Amino acid sequence: MKKGYFGDFGGQFIPELLMPPLIELEEAMKTILPTEEFQTRFTNMLKENVGRPSAITYCPNLSKDLGLDLWLKREDLNHSGAHKINNTLGQGLLAKMMGKDVLLAETGAGMHGVATTVAAAMLDMKAVIYMGATDVVRQAPNVGRMRLMGAEIVAVESGTKTLKDAINAALRRWLSDQETTHYCFGTAAGPHPFPTLVREFQQIISKEAREQFMARNDGNLPDVVVACVGGGSNAIGMFHNFVPDESVKIVGVEAAGTGEPGCYSSAPIDHGTDGVLHGMMSKLLQTEDGQIEPSHSIAPGLDYPGVGPEHAHLDAIGRVDYTTINDAQAINAFKTLSRREGIIPALESSHAVAYAIENREKLQGKSVLVCLSGRGDKDLGILDQIL
Amino acid sequence: MNKMQVKIEEARAKGKVGLIPFLPAGFPNREQFWKEMEELDAAGASVIEIGMPFSDPVADGPVVEKASLKCLEDGINLTWILTELKKRKGQFKAALLLMGYLNPVYQYGLDKFGADCEAAGVSGLIIADMPLEESQFVKDAVEPHNVALVPLIGLNTTKERMRLYADGAQGFCYFVSVLGTTGQRESLPARIKEKLAEAKEVFDIPVALGFGIKHPDQLKEFGGLMDAAVFGSALISHIESGHSSDSFMEPWK
Ligand SMILES: Cc1ncc(COP(=O)(O)O)c(C=O)c1O
C-alpha cells in the first residue's frame, strides 16, 4: 500500500509548500509520540483534565421504549463537551514538544475550536481559530467560550462560509506561518499524516468502550456499534478497536440534510463520488466537473462535503455500513434522549442516536452501543429557532 | 524540447526575462478573455498561464480566488477551455500552460485530458495541490501527449527535494517567491536569492519566479538568478479596473 493510503484513499494532495511541515509532523509522530515523556504527560492530561475514562451509560427508559439495549459512550462528559479534546490535547502536546507555539485550527460546530483553545491555554500556547461566518452565527455560545479563553477567531467569508471554507483558509494561513504554527486538524481527514494521527488520539474511545461494555455484559461484545460521521474522527475512534471483531456490526451515520430530493446533504459516502479535496483522495459531494458542492446539515459539525479517507476505505471493503439520518430525525432524537434520559446530545451525536430510534424494528433485542460524541448545549440556539 | 522552454530561451537570447502572465479562463468574461489572450500574446508573452477555475483554490489569494469563482459562476469548465483552445490552435505565438487543482482534471479523466490538451496546443500543466509524492499518475497520463508537468517549488523546498523534482522535469521550474498564497506583495523575502541560486544550480530547465510580482523593477535584484517572471493578481486587478492587458505589459517590454 502506498504511504498514507487506506486502500485507494488518502494521500497528500496539497501544495508543495506544505510538504515540509507535513514531513516534519510525520517525523515527530515517529520520534516524539512513542516516548515515555509524551505518553505519560498525555495520559495524565486525559485523566486529570479531560476526565477520562469517560463513562458508558445504559439507557433504561429508551431501551424499554425501543425494545433494544441502548448504551452510550459518553464523550459528552469530557471537559469542553466533546470527543474533540482527545485529539487537540494530543496534537497540542506534540506541537509543543516540536517547539511550536501557536495552534491553528478550523472549526464547524465550534467544538474543535473550543477544544483547541483549551489545549492551547493548558499548554501555554496561542490559539488561532478559523470558522465559517455562517457557523460563527449559528454556534455563538462556542465563539464566546473561545474568546473568553483567549483565542483569536477569524470569521471566513469566502465560499459557503462553513467548515470547508474554514479549512481552506486555515491551510492558507499554515502556508505562511508554518515555522511557528502547528495546524491542529480537527478530524480524521486531510492530508497524511492527519487521518492516522487523529485516529491515534481518538481510538481511546473504542479502547475504553470495548472494555467497559464487556465488563458490564459478562464479557460479551455489543451487537451494533454506531457513530455519526462528519469528517469522521469520533467515528474512527469509536470503530477502531471493534473493526477486528467480526461479530460486531459497525454503522456510520452521515447527515442527509433536510432529506428532500435535491437538498444538499452532508453524506459523501452515501451520495458522493471519488475525488480530491483538502489534501486527500476520498468520497466527495461534487459536480460532474469536479467542483465541490456545498453541503447541508442542521448539525454544523457534520456539514462537510468530504469524509476521512479511512471511512471511504472501510465502506469500499464493506466492513462498516454507512447510512443517513435527516435533520428532522436528528431533532427527534435530540428531544427524545433529552426527555427520556436527561441527556442533551449534540445535534451531531443526535444523528447516531436517531439510527437506533429509526431502526428499532431491525434492532429488536440487540445491544446497541452509540458514541455520544458531544453535548447539545451549544445547539439550543439552533433549536430555539425551529421548535 | 518543450515549447515553454523554447519560448523562455528565445527571450533570454534577446537579453530579456521570459514573461508568463496568468489569467483565469473566461476572465473577465468569455469574449473578452480571448481579446486579452491576443493582447498578451502580441505583447510578447513567452508562456500564457490559463487558470482552470476550482471551487476550493487553497493556494490562491483573494484576487485570484474571486476572479476564478466568478468564472465558475459563468459556467466555465474544462470542456469549454479545451474546446475553445482547440478552435484557436496555432493562433498563439506564446506557449500555453493550464494551471489549476487536481479534482476537476481528475473528474475530466486524465487520459482524455492529456489527449485534449495536445489537440488544443497546450504544452504545460501546473497542479497546485499535487506534490512530487502524488504526481506520477498525472505525469504518466500527460507526458505522452507532450504536456509537461511543471514543478512548483519554494523557499522551504530542500535541495534534496529540488533534485527529485528536477529529475526528468520539462518546460520550466516555477519558483514560488513567498510562503503563502498568490497575490501582490510590497516586498519580496530576502531569502529568495539564496534559494533561487540553489534552484538554478539544480534545474537544467529555465527557472521562473512567481507570486507577488507586479512590476519589472522588483526583479532587478534577481538578475541572472531567474529566467522568467509570472504575474497574475496584478494583471487581474489591472483588467478589473478597466485597463487593457496591453498597457499592463508595456513596462515589461
Ligand atoms: C459533538 C460532535 N460530534 C461529531 C462531530 C463531527 O466530527 P467528526 O466526524 O470528526 O467526529 C463534531 C464536529 O464538530 C462535533 O462537535
Image: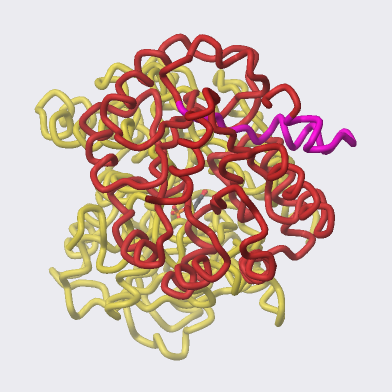
Q: What is the x, y in percent for residue A154?
A: 64, 29
Which shade of the palette goes to chain B? red
Q: Looking at the image, which is closer to me, B179 or A196?
A: B179
Quarter that holds the C terminus of chain B: top right
Which shade of the palette goes to chain A? yellow
Q: Which residues are magenta?
A: B227-249
Q: Looking at the image, which is closer to me, B195 or A79?
A: B195
Q: Is residue A310 visible?
A: no
Q: Looking at the image, which is closer to me, B228 or A350?
A: B228
Was residue A369 drawn as part of the magenta stretch in this picture?
no
Q: Looking at the image, which is closer to me, B245 or A94?
A: B245
Vertical relation: A345 (above or below) A181: below
Residue, x 40% and y 55% (percent of image)?
A280
Q: What is the x, y in percent for residue B250?
A: 75, 27
Q: Indicate the quadrant where residue A329 lies.
A: bottom right
Q: How is the image coloured?
A: by chain
Residue, x 56% and y 68% (percent of image)?
A285
